[in-house]
Image (cartoon, helix red, strand yellow):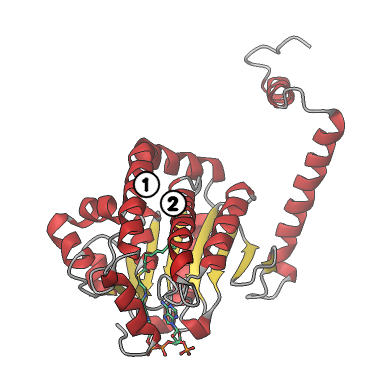
């Protein structure tokens, strides 16, 4: 039908909605409508029928618990006995979970950790049991995966919030520079011991950290490995706000729930306006960091540090 006039608000809205579907078949459009209504009715039931804390669980993962409730998708790192160290499988699962969250109905996405740690960084046992002949290929594959992992933070289209429930180490800290808000318990610490491990910065931190806190403070963390308290990280602009540990979960989730009630499209678009300008720069920084890290991971300095950790000679 011809496009209704500009003051025929209702018919114009209907016309625009039909038109936006393009050549989508009628059956697909009908199914999308049914899916949308089902999701709305189940989320409106969730506040009254689902007990607090009993979130609706999504896809099963080995190392994550992903739940969605009240417009918030929560991705929880779930290897508490290993302080939530990120192994190869967990990297891949986070990539998948972010992809799914970018397309679901949630307004906000949250990353957090299960147990006393937020995350102890890259799993240092990842290279154990590998023969000398296999190491180069394994390092290359891991670095390809790391690049995709970091790009999935750069590309994430909605506000991504880190709820830092305890100490954070290495890549768990650097990636905070790509998050849109960071709420930390006063028990959390922030440590990037790259030089200690013969490594170099990743997660775009070589670019985001100097921008957030200035080059001198960034070098203190990324090169000299200074461990920050939550208050110090907040003063440097890496953390948005610090909460007392005993009320952390209650206060943060109340805040997030209030934010999740803002208009979803406005929130998403505003985040993109702020972040998109830098995407190309961040892809380039990520690629460069991965290439430097590839050489570092094969260095004696790094291999010795990993051996020391594995033989229990050294911890942070
Ligand atoms: C994909 C490409 C590669 C990217 C490389 C870029 C690197 C990025 C980084 O993240 S560098 C940072 C790496 N992380 C660390 O150096 C931390 C190492 N861990 C520790 O120093 C300590 O475990 C601790 C300070 C985090 C906690 O100490 P403590 O409270 O005394 O607990 P335990 O040491 O007994 O830990 C319990 C349990 O967890 C295991 N574990 C902890 N962290 C890691 C880790 N990063 N990798 C592997 N395993 C870890 C620890 O071994 C214990 O296991 P066990 O009970 O002995 O089986």
Question: Secondary structure beneath disc 2?
Answer: helix
* Residue that sits furthest to the right in the current view: 27
* Residue that sits furthest to the left in the current view: 216
Residue at point 43%, 44% (across, down): 271
Looking at the picture, how far across and down is residue 214, in whole percent? 16, 54
Residue at point 57%, 49% (across, down): 102
**Which of the two labelled residues, at mark 1 and mark 2, occupies the earlier sequence position?**
2
User: Is residue 193 shown to the viewer in this render?
Assistant: no
Q: Nearer the viewer, residue 146 or 8?
A: 146
Q: Nearer the viewer, residue 311 or 114?
A: 311
Instruction: Give the quadrant of residue 260.
Output: bottom right
What residue is pinned by disc 2? 147
Q: Nearer the viewer, residue 62 or 294?
A: 294
Question: Secondary structure beneath disc 1?
Answer: helix
Give the vertical position of 75 relative to 277 (above or below).
Answer: below
* Residue that sits furthest to the bottom in the current view: 312
What residue is pinned by disc 1? 287
Looking at the picture, how far across and down is residue 90, in whole percent? 55, 67
Residue at point 74%, 24% (across, down): 18
């Amino acid at each position: 039908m011809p496009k209704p006039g500009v003051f025929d608000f209702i018919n114009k809205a209907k016309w625009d909605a039909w038109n936006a579907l393009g050549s989508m078949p009628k059956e697909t459009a009908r199914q999308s409508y049914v899916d949308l209504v089902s999701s709305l009715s189940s989320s409106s039931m969730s506040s009254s029928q689902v007990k607090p804390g009993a979130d609706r669980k999504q896809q099963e993962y080995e190392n994550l618990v992903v739940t969605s409730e009240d417009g918030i998708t929560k991705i929880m790192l779930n290897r508490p006995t290993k302080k939530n160290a990120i192994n190869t499988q967990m990297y891949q699962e986070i990539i998948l979970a972010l992809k799914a969250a970018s397309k679901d109905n949630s307004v906000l996405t949250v990353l957090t950790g299960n147990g006393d740690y937020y995350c102890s960084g890259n799993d240092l046992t990842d290279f154990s049991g590998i023969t000398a002949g296999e190491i180069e290929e394994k390092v290359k594959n891991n670095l390809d995966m790391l690049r995709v992992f970091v790009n999935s933070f750069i590309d994430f289209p909605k506000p991504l919030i880190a709820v830092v429930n305890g100490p954070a180490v290495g890549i768990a800290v650097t990636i905070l520079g790509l998050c849109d808000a960071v709420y930390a318990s006063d028990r959390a610490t922030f440590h990037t011991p790259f030089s200690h491990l013969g490594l170099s910065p990743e997660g775009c931190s070589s670019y985001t950290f100097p921008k957030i806190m200035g080059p001198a403070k960034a070098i203190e963390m990324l090169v000299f490995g200074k461990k920050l308290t939550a208050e110090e990280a907040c003063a440097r602009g890496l953390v948005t706000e610090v909460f007392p540990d005993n009320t952390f979960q209650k206060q943060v989730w109340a805040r997030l729930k209030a934010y999740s009630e803002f208009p979803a499209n406005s929130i998403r678009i505003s985040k993109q306006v702020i972040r998109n300008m830098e995407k190309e720069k961040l892809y380039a920084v990520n690629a460069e960091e991965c290439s430097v890290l590839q050489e570092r991971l094969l260095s004696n300095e790094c291999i010795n540090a990993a051996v020391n950790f594995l033989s229990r000679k050294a911890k942070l």
